[in-house]
Image (tube, coloured by chain):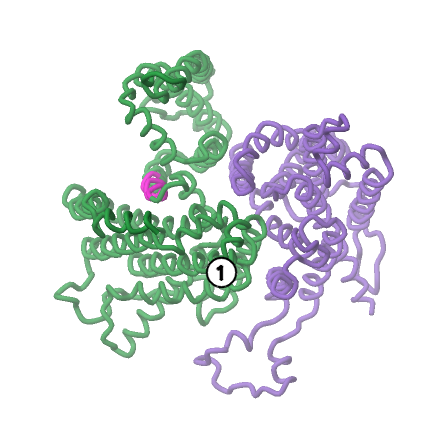
Amino acid sequence: MDLILVNLIDGLVTGLLLFMLSAGLTLIFSMMGVLNFAHASFYMLGAYFAYQISMVLGFWMGLLIAPVIVGVLGALVERYGLRRVHQYGHVPELIFTFGLALLIEEVVQFIWGKDQMPYSIPEVLNFTALSIAGNAIPAYKVFMIFTSVAIFIALLYVLTRTRVGMIIQAALSYPRTVEALGHNVPLVFMGVFGVGTALAGVAGVIAGPVLSTFPGMAVVLGSIVFVTIVIGGLGSLWGALVASLLIGWITTFAKAYNIRMEDILTGIGFEKPLEMSENVFRDLWTITSPQIADILPYLLMVLILVVRPYGLFGKRDA
Amino acid sequence: MTTQTVSRKTRAPLVSLSAALPWLIATLFLLVMPLVFTSNSALTIMNQMAITIVFALAYNMLLGQGGMLSFGHAVYMGMGGFMCVHVMNYVEDFSLPLPLPLLPVFGGLFGMGMALIVGSFSTRKAGTVFAMISLGVGELIAACSVIIVAFFGGEEGVSGDRTYGLPVFGVEFLHQIEVYYLTAFWLVLSALLMYLFSRTPIGRMANAVRDNPERAEFLGYSARWVRFYSFVASGFFAGIAGGLFAINYEILTEENLNLATSGSILLVTFLGGVGFFFGPIIGAIVFTLLQTVLSLQTEIWQLYLGLLFVATVMYFPGGLAGVLMMHTLPIRFGKAGLLVGPYFKTLLPALACIFGAVSLLEILFHFRHAALGDEEMTLFWVTFNSHSPLPMLIAAIATVAGFWLARRGAPELAEAWHEANTPNAPQGGAA
């Protein structure tokens, strides 16, 4: 029971981190119809900028400044890159963001090199917040949970309760009408793109110390984020939340409990073959759940796409 | 009805000389190349080029002709290759009479089988959804390759020996040159088949579905099935490329399946140009050369490649082939000569700007990442101290001056371009 609680918390941390990325991504998608392939690259930039700032001004200033820089960069990319490519259609837009992801990775390697950065947890948070049956929960994890929840609530408040949020929501569905009413829709788009990338930047700042800051961190998380929003349904914020938490918990539990395929198969009633080395299905028999934890999201995605092509919360024509 | 009969009467013969000529020239070219470049490394590069061309053409069946952007196409090439290595080993163990030149067929069939399975659910939608599914499936299979050791051989991959069987007409495929002709044969054959596919009704419908799926549906075609057929055909040719890879390198690993390989084929195809059949061919040749030459010269060649790619997407969405084909109109009007002067005036400074920027980057990179105390670097055949400000200053000046001059020449080029693309004043009547 206690172990379940610990795993629930671990999964929640992973899930909320994923959500911070997928929320921005899905917001950008529902607005412009373009999936920002470079989204995880902005997450990486967030971590690197925060590291660089924390060297001089400390962690907290990094948390404040780095996302702003990332957001401004994102807005610039939208203004001078995406808007230009937009005229050619959605596929070139996707290719553009893909190229951008490659480019950002190379630029990061150019500036900071290929090694991992010594970006670490601030001293203030480097203690055990609580322990559950001997399993320590670091304060930093609690901090991560609270930060992401706070950001989510703030986002929800802005989107649903303020005038700016209303305009954004309207611009999502009826950009022409909103433009006719006198609002600067391209500016709104640029702003949302900037905020979305800034969110990814925040995720990078707080994930950098625990998931390590290295040039491959965008690739590691990048495809999982896409899987998340495909599972949740493209363009659905709630879907992104549910799918993020789902993936967080599934991978955490698969890693924590060593479920062996052998037990499942014998449980169903199969006989384990005596001679394993030449058996075609030998790999199937030796699979354990920690081994496949990282590919479970992809499996889940394929399954969901076969059963429900538009994702969990997606609309029919998303 | 009358138009139909007329067109049937005046129809050109099945294979006209002008249509066959490029193919004949290309074949001749492929036959002669090894006589010009005889070294083994040149043959290796040419083999690599040929494989990349087949793969890029297969990829363009999706991207260029079908409008489907795939982020996981390496899977079909990789699976075909893995299958070929297994067949190779199987034939060797049981000494079956299967000649090596037929091996790529197995790769193709297996790639096609994979495409059948994946395509059954991924081709329902084009565009973003298709791209995401292809990415997910690609990552899934790449990750599986480490787990399913029986087929993928785990981290070290699977390897075989191409000289397994009986000699085919006395050829044992021990030498690079024999492998080269085998690869070249498959290159011509599969390129021709892919070209012919694009001329069939289903290939034409793929274009229609790419441009306007709704309208194609109103014509009575199921957009989904049209996409599915293209996808399966593309899987087949990607599998053939995989088979050629297996014959050339005799080893396949996880690297042949992962996102990096899928991404690089997108890069190749897009750089070459997706709008024309021969675009990916140019792309594959240029990319392989760039990769070979640049990676020997500089450590940050991938940065240049990324910059080139992003610049291509932003400014030349037609790729290299698009840029080349832009000049057909001026040539047809006989006005191409007008462009030469402005081209020199703009492109020479632009070149200076690029060289300057490259030098800046190289100096900076050396400054930051070279071993401690190593302050000497050689760039463009000049050796200097990377820590002294003078080289950086020269590079910066070249960059800025080149940029300024190129900008100044740009309006003139645009003018000349406009002029060259306008037909000569028509006899009477408004233009």
Q: Residues within 10 Å of mark 1 (few under 14, many from 20)?
A: some
* Quadrant location, the C terminus of chain B: top left
Left or right: where does residue B428 sit relative to residue A267?
left
Left or right: where does residue A267 sit relative to residue B41?
right
Chain B pictured colour: green
Which residue sits furthest right? A161
Query: Which region is colored magenta?
Result: B278-286
**Is residue B19 covered in magenta?**
no
Which residue sits furthest left? B170
Task: State the image coordinates of residue B242 (x, y, percent, origin top left).
Answer: 36, 58
Near-viewer residue (B399 or B232): B232
Q: Quadrant of residue A244?
A: bottom right
Q: According to the image, label 1 marks what residue?
A: B225
Chain at numbered mark 1:
B
Callout 1: SS:
helix
Principal SS element in the magenta part?
A: helix
Left or right: where does residue A289 sit relative to residue B38?
right
Task: State the image coordinates of residue A42 (x, y, percent, origin top left).
Answer: 63, 38
Near-viewer residue (B56 or B366): B56
Q: Quadrant of residue B326?
A: top left
Chain A pictured colour: purple
Q: Answer above or below: position of A131 versus B67.
A: below
Task: State the image coordinates of residue A245 (x, y, percent, origin top left).
Answer: 74, 56
Q: Residue at x 37, y 62 (%)?
A: B81
Q: Residue at x 44, y 60 (%)?
A: B229
Q: Quadrant of residue B83?
A: bottom left
**Is residue B283 covered in magenta?**
yes
Q: Answer above or below: position of A228 versus A54.
A: below
